[in-house]
Amino acid sequence: KYPATKVFVTFETEEAQRRILGHLSVGSRTVRRNDVMKLDNPEHLFRSALVLNVKEADEPSTVRWHDLSDRRWDRFLKMSMTAYAWACAMVMVAFVVRLCRHRS
């Protein structure tokens, strides 16, 4: 089993989206406390036990799909490797510039 970090649901119509969001939306305090009594219908619970934190998603073009399930450590490593590659490239460029100046 793999834990879900985020789930995206698409709707056929804007009306259906609004209706479902209206039924499932509760306050953040209710979600944190998992207060199942705040929901009108017990069938709206996830796995019959959990209150979901439901909100309208960003537009699909703004979602960075590859980063959704990355842990902080994974993101840190990716950013560190990118910074290291950038620094190496700058050192190589500086070396080439210095080499060209000495030859002229």
Image: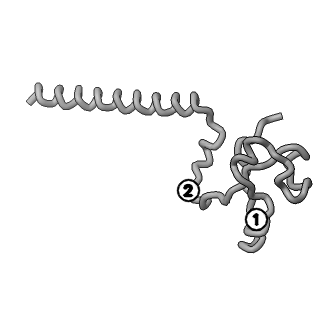
- Say whether disc 1 or disc 2 marks the residue closer to the N-terminus: 1
Give percent across and percent down for residue 54: 72, 54
Which element type, helix, strand or loop, lies under badge 1?
Answer: helix
Kindly indicate the quadrant of the structure image that contains residue 62. Answer: bottom right
Q: How is the image coloured?
A: one colour
- In this view, the residue in front, 35 or 72, is 35
Question: For residue 62, which numbered disc appears in the image?
Answer: 2
Residue type at mark 1?
Gly
For the C terminus, the quadrant is top left
Give percent across and percent down for residue 35: 81, 46
Q: Residue at x 71, y 46 (%)?
A: 29
Mark 1 vs mark 2: give the one in front: 1
How much space separates mark 1 and mark 2, taking CA atoms? 24 Å
Position of residue 95 relative to residue 57, above or below, is above
- In this view, the residue in front, 3 or 80, is 3
Left or right of 103, for residue 68: right
Kindly indicate the quadrant of the structure image that contains residue 8. Answer: bottom right
Give percent across and percent down for residue 33: 76, 41
Question: For residue 79, which numbered disc appears in the image?
Answer: none
Residue ID for mark 1: 22
Q: Residue at x 74, y 58 (%)?
A: 25
Position of residue 49 relative to residue 58, above or below, is above
